[in-house]
Image: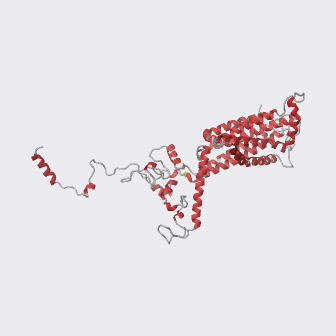
Amino acid sequence: MSPALATTVFSKWSKQPQPSSGDEHRRGPLLDVSSTSRSYGTIYNSPLEVHYEEDSRPYDIGPSRSPNEGPVYHGGASFFHGESDDEEDWEMEQEGLYRGSYTRSMLLYSIVPAFALLWFILVGFVPYTFYPLHPDETPPSIQHLPFPLPEILLSLSLWSLSHTMRVPIYTISSALTPSTFPSLTTILFAFLTTTLTNVLRILAIPFLNLKITNHPTTTEPAFRCMWWFALAWAAADVVVGVYQGYDAIGLYKDSFVDSTTMHLTDEEITLSGKRPATAPEEQDDLSSPADSVAGLPVTSNAATFFVGGESPVDHRPDLPRAMTSQTTLEDALDHDLEQLISIERREELELIYGTPFVRIPIFVSCLLRLDTLFSTLGFTLLTSAAYLRYAVSSSHPITPHLFTSLHDSLSAHTPALLEVSSHHRSNPLLPLMITLPSVIVAHTLLSSLSMSPFLARVGVHSAAYVGVLVGLGACFAGMGAWEAVA
């Protein structure tokens, strides 16, 4: 470029008005970008829903959170638009929240006791419908107690004894097995408890003064007595299981998110009066360190005031006395402690089941109760038939003194085990010696499958299906031992 041309260009440029230092920051963009451009990832107040706002921060990560922790859950919808329900549920579970309603979950779980009651009624009428007794034969009565009251009372008493012994048995099992092998502890505990359970069921036979003429059949009154005894035992197990189910759902009372307010906008929430639930993390972020006592998060508004109506920070002497009372603060602490205990119990329960309890389908819970009914009925019929067959073969009357009769029978037949006699060509104890260990082994495996750590590995669905199949097999085998199945 020639010097003359350069001088001309510089003179024209110097005559144009130059921007001041204040205008430097107001200079427009080089490209023609609309002023309504939106930034990425700004989280609005609506639950779990990503909104794009003008002139907002790149990410609303909330106080005391780093950008790597991701967005804060605000109560219900998904982090991103167009997300599937499964992804929404997964993200909510990461925050310890679940879609649904506590009241609806409790009402839905009521199907389980109704289902169990229906099956108990159907099974209770089976002996009267398919296996009637002879007109001259009636079930025995004990001390003028009508049938089946003695069987039910004795069954509940023995069940209570076996249930009470579970704690000391578990203590013994834990002491005998190394702590590094929890599976071994579970197997030993299941073996000892099932052995005690089946022995107690056999002990009920002499207490009920049951007798048979030749061999166990459905025409014997003893069959109907043992049927009701097994039903009462199974009913006790089912009632405890249903109660534990309701108690487990109660642990999730503060973790449900109402699906009707998950996708509402602020205007809809204001008009309807509904407010989406907030996650515990959000409540903790909004509270200051002064709002916690003894290191525990306090969610109550009363906990933000100090005893005596004076805060060490701003010294407010005119705070309401009702909000600064020691009782209010203690109530807030008790509420937070209860929440912490519920969270701990909920985590322990999820470790046992391998999944949140509220995520277990109602159908699976019904199968678990059905498994209890069939397995208890089948194992009881098997062991009772084997013992009554032994009692008839040994030609010893069945008296309430069970241990005396067992001692006498074993003493009388000890020579028969060593030499063949014309009167004792077979061991009368053989059916009981085969049946009782087989029932204990099957019962042990079935019980171990429903305990930790096997239940979490196998899955509650598989455990329920296997339990129903084994229970049905045991039930048909027990009925076959009484010649109820042709």
Quadrant assignment for the C terminus: top right
425 relative position to 25: left or right = right
Pinpoint residue 443: horizontal percent, then vertical percent.
71, 38
Pinpoint residue 77: horizontal percent, then vertical percent.
48, 49
Quadrant assignment for the N terminus: top left
149 relative position to 74: left or right = right
User: Which colour style is shown?
Assistant: secondary structure
Q: Is residue 126 above or below residue 287?
A: above
Quarter residue 399 falls in = top right
Pinpoint residue 477: horizontal percent, then vertical percent.
75, 34
For this orientation, the residue located farthest to the bottom is 318
Q: Is residue 136 visible?
A: no
For this orientation, the residue located farthest to the right is 422
For this orientation, the residue located farthest to the left is 4
Seen at 65% across and 37% down, the residue is 465
Q: Is residue 272 above or below residue 328?
A: above
62 relative position to 461: left or right = left
- Which of the pair 341/268 is nearer the observer? 341
Pinpoint residue 428: horizontal percent, then vertical percent.
84, 33
Seen at 58% across and 61% down, the residue is 333
- Which of the pair 69/128 is nearer the observer? 69
- Which of the pair 106/173 is nearer the observer? 173
Seen at 85% across and 29% down, the residue is 426
Q: Is residue 23 visible?
A: yes
Q: Is residue 455 above or below residue 283?
A: above
